[in-house]
Amino acid sequence: MMTTGKEARADQKTTVERLLHDEQVLVHINPGFSGVAIPPHLQENKTVTLRLSRYFKGELTTDDERITAELLFGSSYVTCVIPWGSIWGASSLQGDEYIWRESAPEEILHLLRDHADHERGRPERRSNAPAASRPQPTHLRRVK
């Protein structure tokens, strides 16, 4: 099912806010999206992963349009603005991962397609666990 931009933003907001009830969440953003404000040294990247938590010292707020978070980079706090539409993925510390393809940069979509093609070519793995409970392979990796 294809979602509209407004529906995708609502899903991103609901999902990320739910994940923020845990200790931390990693949000994967498209830094080229209009309205993104992050440190200059990160702006040229194809994608950026930011660690967010309501337990950090810097302020973190959400509204219908964006996340605003004071995040520590080195020894200085920087106010980051993350529009919901710029978030293409989110990861929890428990391993839950979410991807919104409509927000992903083309390079990420290419990696997702390559990963899916690669997985289709692999022989089926055997497991006694029900299919729904088996860990699913992912291209995302946790960056600390």
Image (cartoon, rainbow, N blue to C red):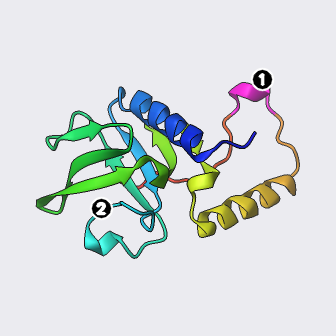
> For numbered disc 1, what is the local secondary structure?
loop
**Which label is found at residue 74?**
none
Which of the marked residues, 1 or 2, is nearer the chain's N terminus? 2
Residue 22 position within the rendered picture, expressed as x and y whole percent measured from the top left: 36, 28
Residue 114 position within the rendered picture, expressed as x and y whole percent measured from the top left: 74, 64
| For residue 124, side relative to residue 58 (left or right) | right
Question: Which residues are drawn in magenta?
Answer: 127-134
Tell me if I can see residue 94 in this picture. no
Identify the residue shown where x is 26% and y is 55%.
80
**Which label is found at residue 130?**
1
Using the image as rendered, state which of residue 5 and residue 103 is in the foreground.
5
> Disc 1 marks which amino acid?
Pro
| For residue 44, side relative to residue 59 (left or right) | right
> For numbered disc 2, what is the local secondary structure?
loop
Using the image as rendered, state which of residue 28 and residue 141 is in the foreground.
28
Quadrant of the rendered structure where residue 54 is? top left
Residue 125 position within the rendered picture, expressed as x and y whole percent measured from the top left: 82, 41
> Disc 2 marks which amino acid?
Ala
Identify the residue shown where x is 45% and y is 36%.
13
